[in-house]
Amino acid sequence: MLKKQEIITEARKLQFADIGFTTAEPFVSQKEYLLDHMQEYGWTQKAGFSLVEGTDPQNILPGAKSIIVLLESYFAEAFPPQLERNFGRCYLDDDRVTKDGMALKVKAFRQFLRDNGIDSKVPFNLPHRMAAARAGLGTFGKNCFFYAKRVARASSLVIPIILVVDQEFSSDEPTVGIGCPDWCRSACVAACPTHALKGGGKIDPRRCISYLTYYGEGLTPRELREPMGMFVYGCDRCQNVCPRNNPWMSETKMMNSRVAAKAADFELSCLLHMDKPYFQQKIWPHMFYMSAADIWRWKMNTARAMGNSLNPAHTADLVRAFKENSDERVQSMIAWALGRIGGRKAEEALEQFHQSSTGIVRDEIEQASAAL
Ligand code: SF4
Ligand code: SF4
């Protein structure tokens, strides 16, 4: 029978940042919290995430005995700054579809377990951060992120990978709790532009920019457009302002060549004009929370980011995209963006578009023109 230390050695050999062990007991407090906050989390059930079911490891692997938590730092290498402006860092080198990065290590680790008679499942719906804290790997921040204890300079730029296994191992000392220093006056809560953070480690996920960028329904409400700033997919603001992340974020790192190689594909002008084949080949394999049917949301987010850049260099692209697109959510956001950037060319374009527009697009054009 495989010993715990042999598993730790294998994890180190595969260069995972850290590893911890916990029991396969249900996550009772998480289940209660989810059930008490269905108004905020009900959408996850509808989206098929089954978070409530995921609180019991037996639903994932009948006969589950332990949980192994691996920790991976997703910011061990630097990312191109132009990508960090518009995308959450954790999505920039996400190989859950391409399976050519971290997935290969997880596969090798599971094979090692299998070769030694241990069955494992890698669930997407088990409470990852709570499992990592229960396995003694770190603590929470008031921004709801998980902070490592021993690696990545104790930052939140880590991903817990969960393996539910059918063999029992001794558990590590849990570290469940908020680990923020007393002197931090909740910089994350103050910095959250959409007031998603409620303090004390609580969040309304429906107000989080990450959620809004890939699951937000319809045209983004006017009051959220400026606060959502230049993020097109994901948001890192509450992690960027956190002093617990300063040591890791300020370290000089080598550029991530995999991410740098695809940076040009994610330029805002490419996203604004992309067609379905472009999306399917270059974007979806890396950022896949939206299907091809939701290209309109990518374009709407991109137009909003361009508008919030206040950069007249985007005006020509926005004018062209208005003519290319018939989706009223995209056209409406383009009108808003042109109004936000302003200038003679934007004004002339809005006047021209007004003549042939109806409904909400016409309303947005009128409001944009009035603001000018
Ligand atoms: S900003 Fe302050 S309160 Fe928020 S997670 Fe970081 S240390 Fe904690
Ligand atoms: S990720 Fe952005 S929107 Fe979400 S809680 Fe943090 S700062 Fe707020």
Image (spheres, rainbow, N blue to C red):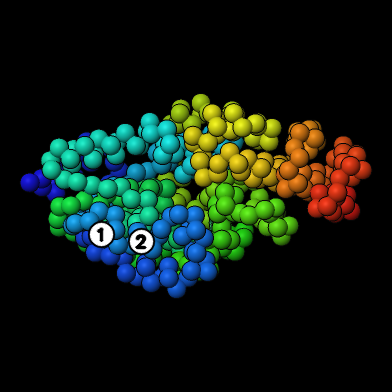
* Residue 120 place in picture, x, y as percent: 23, 47
Q: Image check: 230 left or right of 319? A: left
Q: Residues within 10 Å of mark 1 (few under 14, many from 20)?
A: some
For the view shown, which residue lies furthest in the left direction? 1
Where 30 sits versus 47, above or below? below
Q: Amino acid at mark 1?
A: Gln
Asked if marks 1 and 2 touch (Cβ < 8 Å), the reply is no
Query: In 3D space, how far apart are the residues under numbered discs 1 and 2 (Cα atoms)?
Result: 9 Å
* Residue 161 place in picture, x, y as percent: 32, 48
Residue drawn at (49%, 64%) of the image: 41
Looking at the rendered structure, the secondary structure element under dot 2 is helix
Q: Is residue 194 visible?
A: yes
Where 67 sits versus 185, above or below? above
Residue drawn at (18%, 52%) of the image: 166
Q: Image check: 269 left or right of 318? A: left
User: Total marks drawn?
Assistant: 2
| Disc 1 C-beta below 8 A from ligand 2 | no
Judging depth in this view, the residue of 132 and 64 nearest the camera is 64
Looking at the rendered structure, the secondary structure element under dot 1 is helix
Q: Is residue 243 visible?
A: no
Q: Image check: 13 left or right of 267? A: left
Q: Amino acid at mark 2?
A: Glu
Residue to which mark 2 is pinned = 53
Residue drawn at (65%, 32%) of the image: 274
> Closer to the N terminus: mark 1 or mark 2?
2
Of the four image quadrants, the one with ligand 2 is bottom right
* Residue 29 place in picture, x, y as percent: 35, 70
Residue to which mark 1 is pinned = 58
Residue drawn at (28%, 37%) of the image: 107
